[in-house]
Amino acid sequence: MTKPLTARAWDAITSLKLTIACLAFLMVLVVLCTLAQVELGTFGAVSKYIKSFLVWWDVPGTLWSIPVLPGGALVGVVLAVNLVSAQARRLELSWKKSGIWIIHAGLILLIAGEFVASVFQVESQMAIEEGQTLNYIEGRDLELAVIDVTDPAFDDVYSIPESRLAGGGTIGVPGTPVFLRVKAFYRNAELAPRGPQDPPSPADRGVGASIAVRPMPPVSRDDRVNQTAAFVEPVAGGRSYGTWLASNVLGAPQSFTHEGRTYVLALRPRRQYLPYAVTLKKFSHDVYAGTDIPKNFSSLVHLSNPSRGEQRDVLIYMNQPLRYDGKAFYQASFGKNDTLSVLQVVENPGWLLPYVSCVLVTLGLLVHFAIALRRSSRRRQGVQEA
Amino acid sequence: MNAARIASLVAGGLALAGALVALAPPGKVGGFDVDGFARLPVLEGGRVKPIDSVARNTLLMIRSQQSFRHEGRTIGPEEWVLDVLFRPDVANAQPVFVINDPEVLGLIGLRQTSDRYFSFRTLAPHLGEIERQAQVAHPIDAKERTRFQSAIVNLFDRIYLYYRLENTVQLAGSPGLAAELLDLRASGAQERHRALADLSAFRPLPPPAGQAGDAWRSVGEALRAGVAGNVDPGLEPLARLGRAYASRDAAGFNAAVADLGAVDASRRPEAVKQADHETLFNRAQPFYAGMVIYVLALLALFASWLWKPGILQPAAFGLLVAGAVVHTGGLVSRIVLQGRPPVTNLYSSAVFVGWCAVILGVVLERLYRRGFGTAVAAASGFASLIIAHHLTGDGDTMEMMRAVLDSNFWLATHVVTITIGYSGTFLAGAIAIGYAFRRQFAPRLDPATSKALVSMAYGVICFALLFSFVGTVLGGIWADQSWGRFWGWDPKENGALLIVLWNAIILHARWGGYAREKGIMAMAIFGNVITSLSWFGVNMLGVGLHSYGFMDKAFWALSAFIASQLLVMALCLLPRQFWRPAGSRAGEEVTGTV
């Protein structure tokens, strides 16, 4: 007699074999992800193997991509379903099994925490020089900012994300009469002064006319930055303002004026403005006497939030972040002869989950192994007495 | 008291006595109190240590040995450093530079022979070429250098280190510190003071009480202060010491050493105490002694399988405990000296992994009393101390902690728990290896012992899972505290995760009945592979935030280890005594029937 399909599916979903298969797949993915980091960088490897539902393989010589492995996200979901359903089906609610219950509850929280982090966690940076005050943080990706600087008292910033530029076409800048025609976009390029052999630049305005742009493959290492370049043509009121080169490696601001309003074009890291401001008062980089082994990095900052009436100094140093307003500011890096401090800014609504999970699983393992140890020592005693 | 008890106590006692002999202070070398000199505290690498440590570590870096034979006698690190500091002509003729790379040898016009050690004098004519080649290779990322480039940069660094050491108290070839002190404003004095301050390899002059503990001064800095009228009280005895040593005046040398010691004691009594302790620790070489005792324990145990098990097995256990005592003494000494939890770098992690495995093995032996606990504990202790010994080549094993690691709380929690996890996984693997060999080669098998081994391994895997999981998650929490994210899929984190996953798989496979005795044991052996990859392998990738212990030399050693483990796994899974025809195998499969 064969079981009905639903019963067989239920058996499969709750089976211990599935648990082991998931754990084994996870091991394979973790190994692949670790090895791939040499080539792709941590960020690339994690998005390919861990944060994906399927791992794709580009068949060489064709445009085909075929899925070859379940990705970390898929394995995580299956493992979570397997855990919950097996727990519900097989394990009776008894003191003997209490350890297992606590362990598995903790593990489910851990997986959930990782999902929350991969979906909601935002990592940004604040690169701040001594004496500087900033009210924004910068992301990994870029934006093309069109800034109306007409009023000297304040700037109006309109921005277009990098991904939108990569799509090309004509993009309306919301809130302004300006349209941008994207003529070319290079994720990574080499910018050099244009020599006599170089073809004429597509740009006919600004600094771009004298610069040669040679496309390059995007960088993979996490410590390198893409030199992104785009040729854009602002059009407003039916009139073209010429073609401009925008790039995150160009320093000088470039601007055009339309109907008495001046607009600056800048390709820069995506900014998120904060309702408060941070001033770097002092950055310290201590070394051990007679060596160049770093002893400590710390940033003394002043936090100013007029809306809450908050004015205070905070010392951010190793293993001691500033947690404020849902964001955490960590000492990450430094530069410019120890006058520039780079703070990593992380926002993760689920940051507490791993802490809770850690406590639960530890407790569960202790309870479970204690119960098992007592049972086995009783058994050994029984054998000796017999 | 029965014979077994006596055997165990006698063997352990003898081993401990042997280890204690090393603590006796050495005699004077030709009447010179080199021991007193070696105990003097100095500041080097950011911390206060005895000159003894500076000498040993420098010689270890330059020659890969802590002493050497020259002209028919053994020259110890203390004598060597005295020669380098005060008799550069003598030191320059001593063969202290080890060169293994044939291309580097070719560069300086030498052929590869059995003699791999060269003196500074031999290298001196080629310094220009060595420097030029090293400068070419230097800007290249350490991981991308060719073998020749790595070797030439390494040789240049060692020569430079030697050169700095030579110019720490007085400039090599100058009349010496005593002459310098006679006239602080002599012509060219300013330049010489600056050169001494720039080159000094350590800082011998303690700050007066009241100043910061790390404000020690080099001779050059003290001479400069002397020009301003503030003559350091340590300079005069130091100058006398150097002059007496160079002119072979033992009495004058010994008096100067005592005077310099008195200056140190009056200014920094705690530094003198610390330096004394560390000198004792260096001399005792507890991890070396422990290694020898573990080997003896192992030998006694092997012998016990052939002869008088009633005496030799307890003797082996006694030796194991003695080894554990010495090992523990060394570990505690390091903790006190550094003021840090036991694991601070790759070297100390090896020492600690071995220590945990030994302690667990002692516990197992008390529980099961079959000699297997002793065997695996002694083998693991010995193996890990050998590994630690090969990790000392980079110099000071008690180096200062880099900024983000400078947190005793996290070192004590995350690092210690994760290392205990490594240790447990290795111990389970060691038990399983014992099981595999026994299964193949023992003349007969009794199921009770096999069962005991499996239950030992199972218990240890549970223990390892607990610690590796907690350690991994604590690591995540530390990462959340310092980099703002709990889990970054960094290679070292992934390695730790692999151990957790593998141990979890083993336990689930056992609970589900998918793997029986030999399957579980083969999986436990594979745990060795995963742990070794996680411990050392990920450091070889050279990516990620944990690449503090980058190493390339160990690649082949690691590959060989993994290959050996795979072989033992095969041995474990093959039918018992597979090389014999099926009919004549001794004993039947005791596994497979549960």
Image: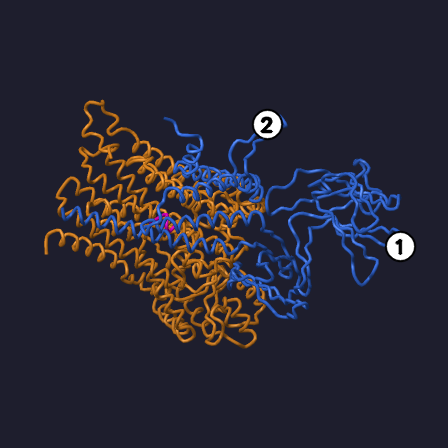
Chain colours: A blue, B orange
Residue density around tag 1, few if under 14, some if 14–19, many if 20 or more, within 10 Å: few
Asked whether, in this view, residue A310 is left or right of residue B358, the answer is right
- Density class for disc 2 (Cα within 10 Å; few <14, some 14-19, many ≥20) is few
In the image, B43: left or right of B458?
Answer: right
Which mark sits nearer the N-terminus, 2 or 1? Answer: 2
Instruction: Locate residue B335 relative to residue B490 in the image: left or right.
Output: left
Marks 2 and 1, how far apart in space? 54 Å
Give percent across and percent down for residue B91. 42, 55
The residue most toward the left is B2
On screen, B348 above or below A83?
Answer: below
Residue indicated by mark 2: A60
| Amino acid type at mark 1 | Gly
Give the quadrant of the C terminus of chain B: top left
Above or below — where is B186 with respect to B67? Answer: below
Say if the magenta span includes residue B464. Answer: yes
Q: Measuring 45% from the left and 72% from the top, which residue is drawn there?
A: B234
Q: Which stretch is magenta?
A: B463-467
The one nearer the camera, B200 or B467, is B467
Label 1 marks which chain's residue? A
Image location of residue B54, percent across then percent down:
42, 59
The residue nearer to you, when weighing B477 against A238, is A238
Q: What label does residue A260 carry, if any? A: 1
Disc 2 sits on a residue from what chain?
A
